[in-house]
Every structure is written in structure tokens, then in C-alpha cells.
Image: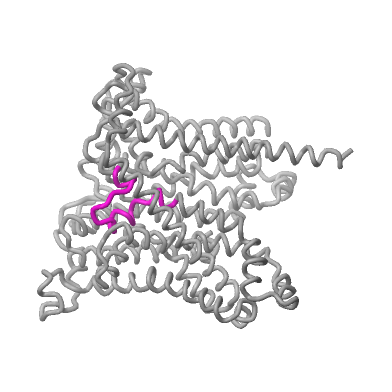
């Protein structure tokens, strides 16, 4: 009974993985098809001309650069804001905490388009023109909340007595922050920075309404897909998927080697 | 607060407060207040702004109820304003997407949490994460390629003899929103899977075994033991998937049929094509209302707190 159920489970897992990866493979495969329309079928022969076309597309390179710059700016602003929010909320309780928490996480649940539009209207009223700087501010408003949640979770395992001890031993306030609290928060801040970076790269809705005339990679892809399309977009997709996959493989190999080391260290103790 | 002052001193505490104040005021509260205020003002040429014509009214919201057209639902035909139809369709099909992703995710979440060999788990989770990091635009585009008339899906189905002739999937076989639902499910299914997985994982396996030992059928174990425990995760997943689907602009624009319209597209037309930001603001506010109603409903129905949903 249990065995057949486990078998069904494995089968279902395999089916889901097939479902998740098949579309990506089809999209990547179309990048090599010598067909004016992006498709794997009918197959008209192998070509690399879509890659060549992509590399000669200046707009793509500008969009790419903009995406990276916006993502870096978002990380630089969202991480301090989110961390400060977590430290503040961790030190208060009661109704004020509930209200603050609600305001902080509300942007996560709000549609991106609404965030983009409200950012656009507000800064327009104080005479700040549209552009990627507004995209950064709009993205930060909800990405800082992700950082806040990560740091807040990490603060639960923090022992405040350490700070007391440091203060008693004559450390300054700055030293307490730098030497005691920040080292403890480092993993959460690192994870927060990574999430902020990827969320920003992924973002489309906020950027679309605030970007003015500048492009980011998602907006570029969107306009290409809508414009009726050549397979250059598949070439770009294949490379992005490739980079993602490579990063995943490197991560996995590191994890395995760390796990092996741990087992080796643990082994003598078991004897 | 006192505690912060004692630990970090006035300067650092002041900095924390200022940072948070900037975030919450300049990036969250004031933009939404501006949005709310602008939604009641008319769309005017620059010279008339602040003039006698610039008065508050519900005109922008009234546009939501203009232009009634014939429509039918479950065989009953009646008249509804065109933007209201779009809004209701968006809600209806987002709910459908949420339901489908739940049905797909629950068995897989259970499998990952309780059945699979724990040593294979990190690799599997990583594999599941890879499609999540691929841009939303590209994931929708992948389905555009698959569903095209001369695409691989039709070729495969006709080749296997399951279909006599190719089908125009994009124009909708069941409803005008087929392709959009397919794209949204594919794009957001993992946002349902991971919260449910997290909540099932925290259930003590002994409880499942105890339930089985006491003679519960497999579906009773799920219904009475596992599902109740997974409630916060399910609530979180449902809110996430529903809000992401209803708020998606990429998927409905990349996978449209001739008759489909998503509410985000309506807003986009007001904002970027008509350049009527005030009506755009009014429609955005309707979205905020929808969002609030949905989150409140889920919190009430699942008896969970906001901190359970936003994790």
C-alpha cells in the first residue's frame, strides 16, 4: 500500500519537473531554429544568427546595463531600510507594533502596478520627473519589506544579553552595533541583498509605470514579445536560463562538498 | 524604544527612526494618499490644474460603471458595464488559477515534506527554484510558443492521434481566458507550493502515523490531520497566488485572446495610452480595495493573522 503510494509520489514529482522544464527547453530550442518566427516546429535547420543579431542589438545592452544598475541601487537602499525597520519593530510591542508591521508588509500584498502608479503620482506632485530613479524608489517600497522579514526572523535568535555585556565592559554604542549586532545579522543581510537583487531584476509592473523612456531588460523583453518578434528573444532567454542553471549547479556542488566535509568530521565521533 | 536608546544611543536610534520614517512615509503612505486624492480629481490640461474646474467628484469612479454591454453568465444574459465585466473576469479567473495551483501543489508539498528521501530534498528544491528565477515575461512567452497554431503542442497532439485537426488554443477552447489561465498557473504555481510545503514540514510525522494506526483512511488523515495543520501555509499561498494573478500584466498581455481583457490592462490603457492618470488612480484604488477584501476574507476564513500570511 505504502509502496504504491510512494511510487505515485515519485511519478507525480517527475511529471511536475517535466511540466516546469519542458516550456523552458522548447523556448531555448527555438533559439537555434532557422525560422523567422520563434518556434521549434517546423524545424528549418540549425543556425546561430539569432545570437549574432542579439549581440548587435544596442538597445538590449543598454537595457541590460540599466537592469543591473537599478538592482544595485535597490540593494543599497532596501537593505538598510529593511534592517532598520526590523530592529525598530523588534524593540516595540502592542498595538503600535501591529500597525507598523501592517504598513510595512502591505506593499508585498499590493499589486505592482498600483505601487508603480502611486509612486509616479506622488513624485510627479513634488516635481520629480519619471525615470529609473523612480523605479528604484517604487521597487524599494516593497523589497525593503522582504529584507525586514528576513532580519526580523534572524533577530529572534539574538541574545540581547551580549549587548548588555558589551555596554557594561565599556563599549560605545557604535561598537555594540558593529561588533555584536551586525555580525549576528550578516546571514540575514546577505540573503536579503540576494533576494532584493533578484526581485529587482524580475520586476516589471512597478518599472513599466515609472521608467519614463528608459528600458530595463524585462521591459525590453516585453516590448519584443509584443512587437511580433524574431527569435533573438529566444537567444536571450536561453542565455538567461543557462546562467540561472549554471548558478544552481555551482550552488549544488558547493552544498554537496560542504555536506561531505561535515559527514567526514562527524564520522570519527560516531566510532 | 527606551531599550533601543540605551543600547544604541541617540544618534543611532535617530538614524533607525529616520530610515524607517523615510521608507514608510515617502515610499508607502504618501504615495498612496496621493493616489487616493488624485482619484477624485478630474483629468485636466496643465493650465487648468488648481483652477475652478479642479474640484473633487466621483466622476472617475463613475467611468467604471459606464458603457453597459450585453453579457451572459451560466446561460443568463444581462447588461453590465464593460470595465465591471473585466474586473469580475479578473477576479473569477484569478480565483480559478488559485484553485488549480492549490490542487497541483498540495500533493507535491506533501511528497516533498513527508515522502521523499531527505538527502535528495535540497537538490529537488533547487531544481524547482530554477524556473522561478527565469523572468516572468519569458515564462509567459514560452507558453506563447507552445500554444501557437503551428506550435509543438498541436503537432504533438495531432501526431499522437489525440486531435484530428490543430486547435487555436490562444483564442480559447473553453473560455476566452484559457491561455491566460495556463500561463498564470505555470508562472505562479511555485508561490503556492513553497508555503504549503513549509507548513506540512512542521507537522510531526508521528501524528500521521498515529492517525493511520488508529484506522483512519488516507483521505481522513489528510482531511483531519494534515490539512488543518497546513492552514497557515495554504492561506499564505492562496493570497500570494491570487494577488499575483490579479495584478499580473505580463501574462495577460503576452497570452491574450481576441476577447480577453485583464483589469491591469485597462489600468495600463488609462495610464500610458490615454495619459489620464486620475482615472488610472481611481481604478488602482479599486484594486487596493479588492486586495484588502481578499486578504481580510482569507484571514477570516482560515482564522490566521497577517503575520502568518506575509512570511
Q: Quadrant of residue B119?
A: top right
Of all residues, the one furthest to the right in this rendering is A271
Viewer-proximal residue, A190 or B126? A190
Left or right of B296? Residue B88 is left
Q: Residue at x 60, y 62 (%)?
A: A153
Image quarter of the N terminus of chain B: bottom right
In the image, is residue B58 above or below residue B249?
Answer: below
Viewer-proximal residue, A237 or B146? A237
**Magenta part of the chain:** A199-220
Left or right of A203? Residue B207 is right
Please provide percent x and percent y for residue A60.
30, 40
Left or right of B78? Residue A131 is right
Q: Residue at x 29, y 62 (%)?
A: A117
Please provide percent x and percent y for residue B235.
51, 57
Q: Is residue A215 magenta?
A: yes
Q: Quadrant of residue B122?
A: top right
Please provide percent x and percent y for residue A168.
74, 78
Amino acid at each position: 500500500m505504502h509502496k504504491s503510494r510512494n511510487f505515485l509520489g515519485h511519478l507525480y514529482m517527475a511529471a511536475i519537473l517535466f511540466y516546469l522544464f519542458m516550456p523552458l527547453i522548447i523556448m531555448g530550442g527555438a533559439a537555434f531554429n532557422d525560422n523567422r518566427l520563434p518556434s521549434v516546429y517546423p524545424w528549418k535547420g540549425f543556425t546561430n544568427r539569432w545570437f549574432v543579431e542579439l549581440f548587435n542589438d544596442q538597445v538590449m545592452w543598454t537595457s541590460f546595463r540599466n537592469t543591473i544598475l537599478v538592482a544595485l541601487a535597490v540593494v543599497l537602499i532596501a537593505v538598510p531600510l529593511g534592517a532598520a525597520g526590523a530592529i525598530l519593530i523588534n524593540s516595540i510591542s502592542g498595538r503600535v507594533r501591529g500597525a507598523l508591521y501592517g504598513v510595512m508588509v502591505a506593499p508585498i500584498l499590493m499589486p505592482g502596478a498600483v505601487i508603480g502608479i502611486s509612486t509616479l503620482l506622488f513624485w510627479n506632485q513634488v516635481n520629480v520627473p519619471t525615470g529609473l530613479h523612480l523605479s528604484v524608489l517604487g521597487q524599494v517600497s516593497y523589497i525593503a519589506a522582504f529584507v525586514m522579514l528576513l532580519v526580523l526572523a534572524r533577530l529572534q535568535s539574538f541574545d540581547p544579553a551580549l549587548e548588555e555585556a558589551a555596554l557594561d565592559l565599556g563599549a560605545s554604542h557604535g561598537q555594540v552595533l558593529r561588533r555584536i549586532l551586525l555580525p549576528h545579522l550578516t546571514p540575514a543581510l546577505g540573503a536579503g541583498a540576494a533576494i532584493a537583487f533578484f526581485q529587482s531584476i524580475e520586476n516589471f509592473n512597478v518599472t513599466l509605470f515609472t521608467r519614463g523612456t528608459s528600458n530595463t531588460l524585462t521591459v525590453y523583453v516585453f516590448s519584443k514579445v509584443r512587437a511580433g518578434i524574431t527569435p533573438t528573444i529566444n537567444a536571450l532567454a536561453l542565455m538567461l536560463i543557462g546562467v540561472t542553471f549554471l548558478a544552481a549547479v555551482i550552488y549544488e556542488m558547493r552544498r554537496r562538498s560542504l555536506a561531505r566535509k561535515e559527514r567526514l568530521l562527524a564520522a570519527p565521533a560516531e566510532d | 524604544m527606551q531599550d533601543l536608546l540605551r543600547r544604541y544611543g541617540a544618534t543611532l536610534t535617530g538614524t533607525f527612526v529616520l530610515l524607517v520614517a523615510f521608507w514608510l512615509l515617502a515610499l508607502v503612505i504618501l504615495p498612496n494618499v496621493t493616489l487616493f486624492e488624485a482619484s477624485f480629481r478630474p483629468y485636466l490640461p496643465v493650465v487648468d490644474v488648481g483652477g475652478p474646474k479642479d474640484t473633487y467628484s466621483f466622476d472617475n469612479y463613475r467611468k467604471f460603471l459606464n458603457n453597459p454591454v450585453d453579457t451572459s453568465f451560466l446561460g443568463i444574459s444581462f447588461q453590465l458595464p464593460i470595465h465591471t465585466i473585466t474586473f469580475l473576469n479578473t477576479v473569477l479567473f484569478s480565483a480559478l488559477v488559485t484553485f488549480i495551483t492549490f490542487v497541483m501543489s498540495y500533493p507535491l508539498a506533501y511528497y516533498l515534506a513527508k515522502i521523499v528521501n531527505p538527502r535528495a530534498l535540497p537538490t529537488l528544491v533547487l531544481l524547482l527554484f530554477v524556473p522561478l528565477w527565469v523572468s516572468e515575461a519569458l515564462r509567459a512567452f514560452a507558453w506563447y510558443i507552445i500554444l501557437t497554431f503551428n506550435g509543438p503542442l498541436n503537432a504533438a497532439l495531432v501526431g499522437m492521434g489525440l486531435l484530428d485537426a490543430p486547435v487555436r488554443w490562444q483564442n480559447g477552447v473553453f473560455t476566452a481566458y484559457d491561455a491566460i489561465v495556463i500561463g498564470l498557473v505555470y508562472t505562479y504555481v511555485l508561490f503556492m507550493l513553497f508555503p504549503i510545503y513549509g507548513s506540512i514540514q512542521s507537522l510531526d510525522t508521528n501524528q500521521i502515523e498515529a492517525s493511520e494506526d488508529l484506522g483512519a483512511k488516507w483521505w481522513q488523515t489528510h482531511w483531519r490531520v494534515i490539512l488543518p495543520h497546513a492552514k497557515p501555509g495554504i492561506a499564505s499561498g492562496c493570497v500570494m497566488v491570487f494577488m499575483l494573478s490579479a495584478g499580473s500584466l505580463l501574462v495577460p498581455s503576452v497570452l491574450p485572446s481576441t476577447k480577453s481583457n485583464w483589469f491591469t490592462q485597462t489600468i495600463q490603457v488609462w495610464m500610458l495610452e490615454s495619459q489620464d492618470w486620475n482615472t488610472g488612480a481611481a481604478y488602482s484604488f479599486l484594486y487596493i480595495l479588492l486586495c484588502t477584501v481578499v486578504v481580510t476574507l482569507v484571514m477570516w476564513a482560515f482564522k490566521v493573522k497577517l503575520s502568518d500570511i506575509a512570511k
